[in-house]
Image: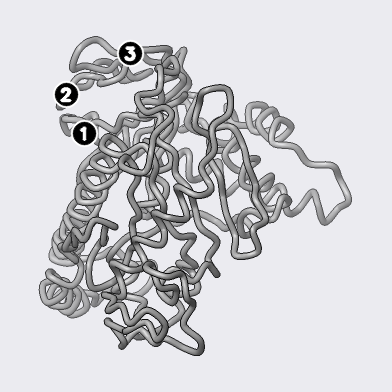
Amino acid sequence: MILAHQIRLDPNNTQRTYFAKAAGTARFAYNWALEEWQKQMDEGQQVTEGGLRRQLNAIKHTQYPWMLQVTKCAPQLAIMNLGQAFANYYRHQAAYPRFHKKGRHDSFGISNDQFKIDGKKVSIPKLGWVNMTEELRFAGKIMGAAISRKADKWFIAVQVEIPDEKPKHTNADENQAVGVDLGVNHLAVLSDGTKIEGTKPHKALLSQIRRLNQSLSRKEGAKKGEKKSRNFIKAKKKLSRLHARVANIRNNETHQLTSMLTQGYAIIGIEDLNVSGMAQNRRLARAVLDMSFFEFRRQIEYKSKMTGSVVVVADRFYPSSKRCSSCGNKWEGKLPLSVREWDCPICKAHHDRDINAAVNLKYNAVSYTVSACGELVEVITSEKQELNIKAG
């Protein structure tokens, strides 16, 4: 298993300048390779990322000598990332690659043979030792690293290959299962009735975000291509720090919830939410994105592999809210989001919409989790009882 540990760096001014140059070099190489890729494709040539890397190496000493001021990994890994982007596009897993813009997702990669870590220090090629705010958390083979900027801070994400640990949960019963219903009113509602309130950091800080956006807009006096004023740059940094604070609060909340679930339960039932579709609703988009549903699923899936938990993902058409958790009767007709409680017409049971959905997700997870060779396996279910079973 490969895990990444992101650590904040503590660089001096010289090191910050180097990072900015390396990120700019990576961005230039990516955009240059994308332009060449499109040009050669139009000419009917066969294009590969390896060929583009060799082509850049042949001309950078004469045409782009400033590239030699930073690590050679910055342009090379950027072109490799472009190759992966095109591979994802051809597999219909991502959109067509777009040109990178300065100031957005500034980053560059380093291969594992070009840097080393000693305690709270990391050695960067052509720069030397840079202080880190903490030591590397994982022990194992280092596979590579990426240095990126968030607001006005620099981070290094070190990828480490760790040995697979013995699963903590095996052959679990219903008492070790939980259903989790995500929503916009609460971050999560568990099948035992627990309701976890979300901090909704974007909503809480929205007034500050609007005020800083207005301040930034008033200072944007220079025309496109002209140098921005110092006040504009300071206002932009202040706004970036606030957005980073929102992201950090949301990430911390999601990490705490997913760690609690994967460490405390062996079977976890969740729903396959259509997040992109929900974000198209102008009344729900801000609340849905503020809850970070996609990040919740990503974290719970990789953490479950570390603890031995099994995540059972119900099909997005599974009627978790419309099915009575007491008698199994399915509510006929529509059940709009404004209806938070309802009574089953068959057994007369009174249901809280979110708790009922979480209980159904738990029952669904327990029903479709089977044992194979003494180990739990992951099952993805659908309303039509068509199972896709694969070893966990």
Among numbered discs 2 and 3, the one appearing first in the sequence: 2
Among numbered discs 3 and 1, the one appearing first in the sequence: 1
Residue type (three-letter) at the residue carrying disc 1: Arg
What residue is shown at x 49% (from left), y 71% (from top)? 319
What residue is shown at x 40% (from left), y 62% (from top)? 360
Nearer the observer, disc 2 or disc 3? 3
Whether residue 246 sits left or right of residue 334 in the image: it is: left
Say which residue label 3 marks: 139
Give the secondary structure at mark 1.
strand
Seen in the picture, residue 219 relative to 78 is either above or below; the reply is: below
Asked if the residue under mark 3 is in contact with the one under mark 2, i.e. CB atoms within 8 Å, the reply is no
The front one of 62 and 103 is 103
Residue type (three-letter) at the residue carrying disc 2: Glu
Whether residue 141 sits left or right of residue 50 in the image: it is: left
Nearer the observer, disc 3 or disc 1? 3
x and y, in percent, of residue 54 in the image: 69, 28
Evaluate whether residue 70 shows in this view. no
Say which residue label 1 marks: 8
Label 1 crowd bin: few (<14), some (14–19), many (20+), radius 10 Å: some
Say which residue label 2 marks: 134
The front one of 64 and 102 is 102
Label 3 crowd bin: few (<14), some (14–19), many (20+), radius 10 Å: few
Residue type (three-letter) at the residue carrying disc 3: Ala
Mark-to-mark CA distance, 2 and 3: 14 Å
Asked if the residue under mark 1 is in contact with the one under mark 2, i.e. CB atoms within 8 Å, the reply is yes
Label 2 crowd bin: few (<14), some (14–19), many (20+), radius 10 Å: few
What residue is shown at x 44% (from left), y 39% (from top)? 310
x and y, in percent, of residue 371 in the image: 54, 32
x and y, in percent, of residue 216 in the image: 19, 73
* Residue 196 picture quarter: bottom left
Seen in the picture, residue 149 relative to 199 is either above or below; the reply is: above
